[in-house]
Image: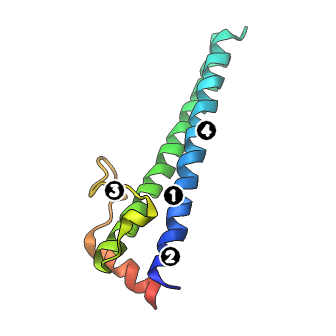
Amino acid sequence: MKYEELIKELCDVIKESEIHACKIYEDFEFLQESIENMDLSIREKEKLDDKISNSLGLLQHQDLHRQRIERVVNFVCEKNNIDKSQYNLADSAKNIDNSEDNMSEEDLEALIKQMQG
């Protein structure tokens, strides 16, 4: 598989992930508003709010993985002189604050070498 094909597939995953994440956030906002208007005990509302909050946390974690994929794509483009503008991909952040999931340049290079082998 050529780098360009790999990059296109990863960009498709990134875009699909963004679309689904937006829809999930919208659905959770709707649920939170609905819960407020329901005739439930405070305890029941708190339990539902906790479930929504936990789910949003998982969605945020998923977004960190999407950002890591973006970093890999940008790294591959830079190292192989590939014009990333054709993939409609924004520049990714060099660091994701407050995350233990950061990848060093060495980790990225090792990942690329592993993909080649």
Who's the residue at 53% across and 48% down the image? 18
- Structural distance between the alpha carbons of marks 4 and 3: 22 Å
Q: Secondary structure at mark 1?
A: helix
Please give left or right for residue 98 compared with residue 22 in the image: left
Give the left or right position of residue 46, taking residue 94 as reference. Answer: right
Q: Earlier in the sequence, mark 2 or mark 3?
A: 2
Q: Amino acid at mark 1?
A: Ile
Instruction: Give the SS element for disc 2.
Output: helix
The residue pinned by badge 1 equals 14
First in sequence, mark 1 or 3: give its number: 1
Q: Earlier in the sequence, mark 4 or mark 1?
A: 1
- Sequence-wise, the earlier of marks 4 and 3 is 4
State the CA–CA distance, disc 1 to disc 3: 12 Å
Q: Nearer the viewer, mark 4 or mark 1?
A: 1
Residue highlighted by disc 4: 24
Residue 47 visible, this orientation: no
Q: Residue at x 34, y 51 (%)?
A: 99
